[in-house]
Image (cartoon, rainbow, N blue to C red):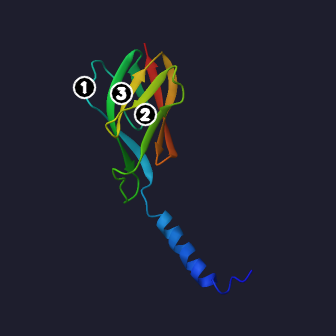
Amino acid sequence: MNISAHGPISISILLVLILLAGCGPEFDTLEITPIEPPPVSVSISGEGPIIMPAEMALAVSVRPISGNDKDYDGYDGVDLSSKDEAIFAVAPTNAGRVFILMGIAVGTTCMEVRINGKKEACIDVQVTP
């Protein structure tokens, strides 16, 4: 294999790709905002834990927060899911970054946060009586 003919070009392209890979946002936390004020006391935070009663559903909007100077934009995909749907469930809506959080049964689990398909966090969840 003769890399000398293409070596400098290949190395230059590789360096550019490495530099571009570091130019995106770096996940720090998830901002979670209830769409309507909850009817009972809940604790909703991207830092966790999320604390809500069983048999309750709450619509929230979410926004990923970057830990560097590159912000996420509206094109960055956000997916939320529960590690144990027997305790807590998450349902996406047709409204972009709006999800329904549902306390199903008393217990603890975590809510996985994926940005552009990459798992970034698992926020602790406590469902109370």
- Circle 1: is it few (<14), some (14-19), or many (20+) Cα within 10 Å? few
- Circle 3: is it few (<14), some (14-19), or many (20+) Cα within 10 Å? few
Amino acid under label 2?
Gly
C-alpha gap between disc 2 and disc 3: 8 Å
Residue at the location (43% across, 29% down)? 90
Q: Which label is found at residue 128?
A: none
| 1 or 3: mark nearer the eye | 1
For disc 3, the marked residue is 43
- The residue most toward the bottom is 5
113 vs 27: above or below? above
Amino acid under label 1?
Pro
C-alpha gap between disc 1 and disc 3: 12 Å
Residue at the location (60% across, 78% down)? 10
Q: Secondary structure at mark 1?
A: loop
Amino acid under label 3?
Ser
For disc 1, the marked residue is 37
